[in-house]
Structures are given as structure tokens and as C-alpha cells.
Image (cartoon, helix red, strand yellow):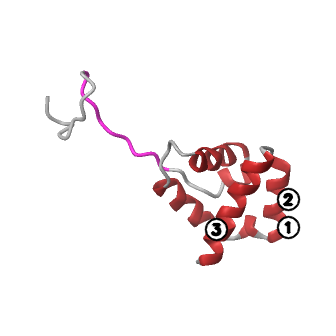
């Protein structure tokens, strides 16, 4: 598990530093991480726990959006919150 977090950090650091996809693709291929199902689950969990307004989340999202290798293996679930027309959180969406 510790290695998976290190791999996630390495992915994000590499993309953050290079701001381009080829080095990330090469890293994933050279390390064999692209076929590591546990890393893919780690990425899914990272999407759930990282605050969306952080650079780490944004970098991870950019990687996911632009690397078909990740997009086909990692499921990103966005939570949907029901709001009333006035912009208030509706705790009872089936009631007016």
C-alpha cells in the first residue's frame, strides 16, 4: 500500500514538473504501473478524497482526461448535490 501512495505521488510530481504527457506515459510503461490494478483503485480513491480545489486534484484530473490508458481503467465518480432554485442545499430532494 505504501508503494501505491509513492507511485501516486511520483505520477503527480512528474506531471506537475513536466506539464506534458509523454514523460508520464513513459513512467507508467517503464514501471509497469499502467497494468497495476491496485494503482488504478488508488487513483479512484484519490479522486474521492482529494479536495477538488487543490492542484493535486486538478493535475490528477488532467491526467485522467488526457491519458486514455487511465480513462479506460479508472472510474471517476462525482457526487451530485441537489440544490433548490434559490441555491440552497435541499436535504429532502423529493419534497417541495
Farthest residue, direction front: 17
The answer to whether mark 1 and mark 2 are in CB contact below 8 A is: yes
Q: Is residue 19 left or right of residue 94?
A: right
Q: Is residue 34 left or right of residue 75?
A: right
First in sequence, mark 3 or 2: give its number. 2
Q: Identify the residue shown where x is 52% and y is 54%.
A: 47
Q: Is residue 50 above or below residue 20?
A: below
What is the distance, in whole Å, between disc 1 and disc 3 at their CAs?
15 Å
Residue 65, visible in the rendered structure: yes
Identify the element where label 1 is drawn: helix
Q: Quadrant of residue 74?
A: bottom right
Residue 60 point in image, percent of width and height? 63, 50
Front in this rendered view, residue 32 or 46: 46
Q: Which residue is mark 3?
A: 39
What is the distance, in whole Å, between disc 3 and disc 2 at their CAs?
16 Å
Label drawn at residue 26: 2
Label drawn at residue 16: none
Q: Which residue is mark 1?
A: 30
Front in this rendered view, residue 37 or 21: 21
Residue 71 point in image, percent of width and height? 66, 50
Q: Residues within 10 Å of mark 1 (few under 14, many from 20)?
A: few
What is the distance, in whole Å, between disc 1 and disc 2 at their CAs?
6 Å
Identify the element where label 2 is drawn: helix
Q: Is 42 included in the stretch rendered in magenta?
A: no
Residue 37, visible in the rendered structure: no
Q: Magenta segment, principal secondary structure?
A: loop
Residue 1 point in image, percent of width and height? 58, 77
Q: Is residue 92 left or right of residue 21?
A: left
Amino acid at each position: 500500500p505504501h508503494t501505491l501512495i509513492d507511485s501516486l505521488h511520483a505520477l503527480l510530481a512528474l506531471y506537475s514538473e513536466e506539464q506534458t504527457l509523454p514523460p508520464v506515459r513513459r513512467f507508467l510503461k517503464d514501471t509497469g504501473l499502467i497494468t497495476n490494478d491496485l494503482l488504478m483503485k488508488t487513483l479512484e480513491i484519490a479522486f474521492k478524497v482529494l479536495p477538488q480545489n487543490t492542484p493535486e486534484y486538478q493535475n490528477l484530473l488532467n491526467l485522467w482526461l488526457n491519458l486514455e490508458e487511465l480513462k479506460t481503467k479508472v472510474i471517476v465518480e462525482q457526487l451530485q448535490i441537489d440544490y433548490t432554485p434559490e441555491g440552497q442545499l435541499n436535504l429532502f430532494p423529493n419534497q417541495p
